[in-house]
Image (tube, coloured by chain):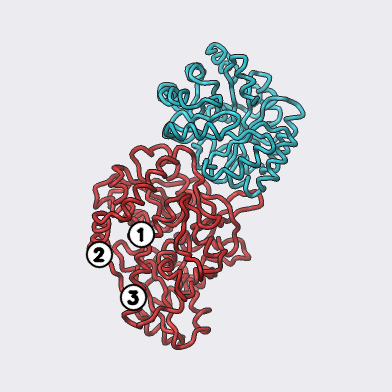
Amino acid sequence: MSFVQNLKCNNHKALSLFVTVGYPTLETTIPLVVELASAGADIIELGIPFSDPIADGPTIQISSETALRNGVTLKKTLDIAEEIRKQSQVPLVLMGYANPIYAFGLSRFLDRCTNIGIDGVIIPDLALEESDEYRRLAQERNISTIFLAAPTTPDERLKQLDDASTGFLYCVSITGVTGERKGIADQAEEFLYRARKCVKKNPLLVGFGISTPEDAKHLGKLSDGVIIGSAFIKALRNASKAHVIERAVEFVKPFRLALDSAE
Amino acid sequence: MNFKINTLPDDQGHFGKYGGRFVPETLMPALNDLEHAYMKLKHDSTFQRELQELLRDYAGRPTPLYFAKRLSEKYDKAKIYLKREDLCHTGAHKINNTIGQILLAKHLGKTRIIAETGAGQHGVATATVAAKMGLKCIVYMGTEDMERQAINVKRMELLGAEVRPVNAGTGTLKDAINEALRDWVTNVHDTFYVIGSVVGPHPYPMIVRDFQSVIGKETRQQILEREKRLPNYLVACVGGGSNSLGLFYEFLNDDVKMIGVEAAGFGISTGKHAATLSAGSPGVLHGSYSYVLQDDDGQITPAHSVSAGLDYPGVGPEHSYLKDTGRVQYVSVTDDEALNAGLELTRIEGILPALESAHALAYLKQLMPKTPNDEIVVVNLSGRGEKDLTTIMKSVDKH
């Protein structure tokens, strides 16, 4: 049973937080993740920074640039994940672009993930068609492969993405890059109804553009959970250095409440 | 050669292990649509007639194959011919591709055109054809490039295009492509992304190559008429690689040596260069698997070249394949070598080449002494140099 199905069993809506590793500082990431888990996050997505993040809007782009300036590499990301795992059993999903992972070596990367106890990996620019070798290696090691599905994805392809995914299916709420937007819930509705019909195997988590607890509640009713990225990163950006973790916990709580009321 | 090297890509868009599609899921259906539309229109006589007419009457094709007599005499070795893509409408080979892609856009019912540009030549060519076809056009351009190619920025604006500055990263072509891809992800329903080189996700490397292969087709016919034989060498500069592949493609199965000249910037050993094939390694950038300039962590490293059109840390996947198979030899020349070669051509042939094309010319200094007198060298003069006047004058003043 996948880590998300575990959550789903209790009719619990998953709350996943995206954290750019090394943002705002290298030292904050470990306590940040541990505290987020205590504050009600069900899954943490650890974002591996990349120089050319084509699926990301300005907020995550800036966080990636900062993280790279702070010296974050894929190797360092894995070291930090290892440390987190010693302190928390929260499901950990790595999210990063293909090139750093290819440069590290697929087997070497997935072996490290296994040893650390990483639950799944999302590679937003690894299309289904290019993923055969990766999926085989990940499956051998029991690491979940999470594909993204978009409103532009046709029904037939939604089914293929469902087949190929082994943790959850990441439903992109709108056609666009990451970043907060107004009125996201209404725009995503139609796609989520369609995804519900086509996707049989995996839980559906919805992300991109969700910025308010109201969005989360609305979309939580139509899915198995939500993913918050840019809005969260922005909250961290606006917090003073000494209060980053406090601010993060403050940010998460209303989302947790909103999702609990969507069950 | 037993197997035809020019039958690629395969149906997944691979050239050997290179190419493919590494893009966000949102774009996958659009790429599939584009591929299907292109495969159909490729053999559609109406589409082809429209394309041929525009290439002839609007772009000004065929371009001459010019025997550079005084340049040849200077070396007193093989004969040097220049394929005069600089004489195309808008001043470079780029328009061959933009005419083709904007025709495709029209057939797909797209009303909004986006493009990236480095030197501004592709941006100008896209803005030009968009103006002619009455389509809205947005061009992404790095802020550093906007400064060094200011004239082309003005040209695009006069043509009615909106030039959007890209500040992120290094403010050059790489970042302009990132931003264009983000725009496309957001507006894919009404927008066609006109990619300017043989890069990007499948089917772009194939489509751009096919539209540019008119360069090689004409060259073959022209040299056979003039010399009754094929050339011994083809030489072209390589940034993303569209003018070189456009020249090479028609000759891949012939006994013709091909040399792609990359930008060595300040010199490969300085780390400030754009010689992706000569000094890079395979990786994923802008939607395909190909050689890239990257550090040990897989972060893309900034390129450098005096020529904005070559200042790119990636290269088309078919070039990566042609390198690994040994079919094409890739070499590099420095900023200074290119500047000098450009000035030389201006003085002895009265042709001011683009700094990009000047890289191909600069390699003649190494190649020509090795060529016997009865051989023929064709250099692709991919663009004209007016856009580079500021850079060239700065360098003249310095020396």
- At x 45% / y 73%, what residue is drawn? B254
Tell me which chain appears cyan. A
- Give the x, y percent position of residue A227: 55, 26
Specify whether disc 2 shares its chain with disc 3.
yes
Task: Point out the residue furthest to the front here.
Answer: B2
Which residue is situated farthest in the right direction here?
Answer: A86
Residue under disc 3 on the same chain as residue under disc 1: yes
Q: Are marks 3 and 1 in contact (CB under 8 Å)?
A: no
- Judged from the image, the secondary structure of the residue bearing numbered disc 2 is helix
Residue shown at 75%/36% (left/top)?
A: A115
Query: Is label 1 in a helix, a strand or a loop?
Result: helix
Query: Where, by quadrant of the figure, is residue B185 drawn?
Result: top left
Q: CA distance from mark 2 to mark 1?
A: 14 Å
Residue named by callout 2: B56
* Amino acid on which the number 2 mark rests in the picture: Arg
Q: Which mark is residue B168?
A: none
Q: Kindly identify which numbered label has been placed on residue B65.
A: 3
Residue behind mark 1: B211
Chain containing mark 2: B
Q: Position of residue A193 (x, y in %)?
A: 43, 22
- Give the Cα distance between marks 2 and 3: 16 Å
Q: Earlier in the sequence, mark 2 or mark 1?
A: 2
Residue sitting nearer the eye, B202 or A78: B202
| Disc 1 residue crowd, few under 14, some 14–19, many 20+, Cα 10 Å | many
Q: What chain is colored red?
A: B
Residue B166 image point, x, y percent:
45, 46
| Position of residue B38 in the picture relative to residue A85 (left or right) | left
How many angstroms separate mark 3 from mark 1 (CA)?
19 Å
Marked residue chain, label 1: B
Whether residue A208 is visible here, answered yes or no, is yes
Q: Earlier in the sequence, mark 3 or mark 1?
A: 3
- For numbered disc 3, what is the local secondary structure? strand
